[in-house]
Amino acid sequence: MRRIIYAVCIFFFALSSNAQEKEMSLSMREAIQFAIKNSYNNKVALNDIEAAKKRKWETTAIGFPQISGVINYQNNLKQQFPGVDFNGDGTVDFGAKHNVTGTVTLDQLLFDGSYLVGLQSARTYLKISEQAKEKTELATREAVINAYGNVLVAEERIEILKGNKKTVDRQLKGAVEGFKQGLTEEETVEQFKITQGNIISQQRNADRNREIAYQMLNLSLGNPINTKLKLTDSLDDLVVNNTDLNLLAQSFNLKNHIDFRIAENDREAKRLLMKLEKNKALPTVRAYVNYSRLANADSFNFFNSSQDWISTSVFGVGINIPIFSSLGRSAKTAQAKIALESADIRLAETKQKLNLQAEQAQSNYQLSIENYETAKKNLALATRIERKQKIKFDEGVTTSIDLLSARNQLYSQQNNYLQSILNIISNKAKLDNALNTPIK
């Protein structure tokens, strides 16, 4: 029996391990859609919207009937009434020992200028939360695009370093053999060893960077950072998908931009705040209906059916009229007016900043495309130069210094090429946000 239980436990443990190690395959577009649903920031933004909806209802409910109930019980531990001494003891007994009062009140707001503004403010607050979520989604898209690109570049850098090391290992081996035979100088062997050591160090660093890149991508997706990922888009796919010259000529729609709409909504919130402070000078009108039952007894027998209860009911209307606040309301209204003026200034600034931001983003994107084309050509040239120098070195026509110089130039162009790809991806993502390009 123990063996069976042990086998079952091992089976389920194996299933659990396989489930945990299962890879998540994602294209760039799938990663963006996944992150919009599952990233930490987007989950918080959704919660903020739900909280805003509850707050809107909380404000709305103020204008609906409010019902409350109160029950009071009193036990007169010592009953005495100072006055005439009827019993010769200096006091006279007065009232019942126990009394209970139950009251139910229905209260209805009839007019309150602040309430009407509150309803408008609640709708504005909800809109602010919805716009914050939209902005969060755009930021999430940019973060995922950059993280996805960093992973692919990290993988490509590792492959390039493998190829570089393989070439150096082969030449170092040949140099060592040549040195043993007296055909190669010791300095040549040492130079190749230095190059080999540098590449090994770069490989270690590249491996660490790759691990961090995967963790950053998982973080932007909302995954545990050690989730296994398989990216289905290649680096070439990203270059093609992120090279769109039409974006350089695309016009900028200011009023559609999320930051402009947020600034407009902020101004509306400040306008409502000023209106609220003004409306606080208006009277508040409420109506109420009150129903009460009262019972008194010398002993606690209120649950007895023979106990007498006295019922009362009241209907009333109350008007609260603000008369003088020692200029407190005026000061608050003035503060709200200043806040509105500041919101107008920020809105004007936002217009200018967004226009400049769009122009800058288009310029940076164009530059990144041009730099990519230059880096690609330079890489091809550096590859040919290195190949020619290698042939010359093998033939004994040139020195190891010339070969290593050409090789270092190649390594530099490889890094420039990878960086130019990252710049295209990053600047395209920034341009999409600057132009408020919808998420697809």
Image (tube, rainbow, N blue to C red):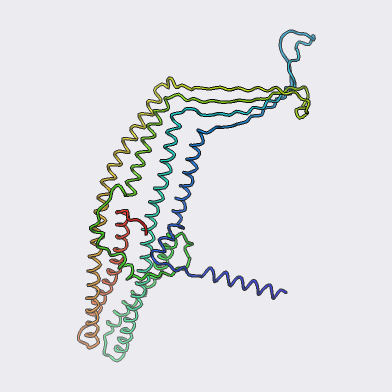
Image position, residue 109 (x, y; %): 51, 29
The foreground one among 212 and 280 is 280
**Res 143 quadrant in image:** bottom left
As drawn, 149 above or below 360: below
| 126 to the left or right of 182 | right
- The residue that appears at 32% across and 81% down in the rendered structure is 167
Quarter of the picture containing the N terminus is bottom right
User: Which residue is the extreme one toward the right?
Assistant: 87
285 to 260, vertically: above or below: above
Please state if 228 lies on the left or on the right of 367 as rendered: right
Residue 337: x and y in percent read 34, 32
x 37%, y 25%: residue: 330
> As drawn, is 219 to the left or to the right of 358?
right
Vertical relation: 415 (above or below) 135: below
For image coordinates 48% across by 70% down, the residue present is 23
Residue 371: x, y in percent? 23, 65
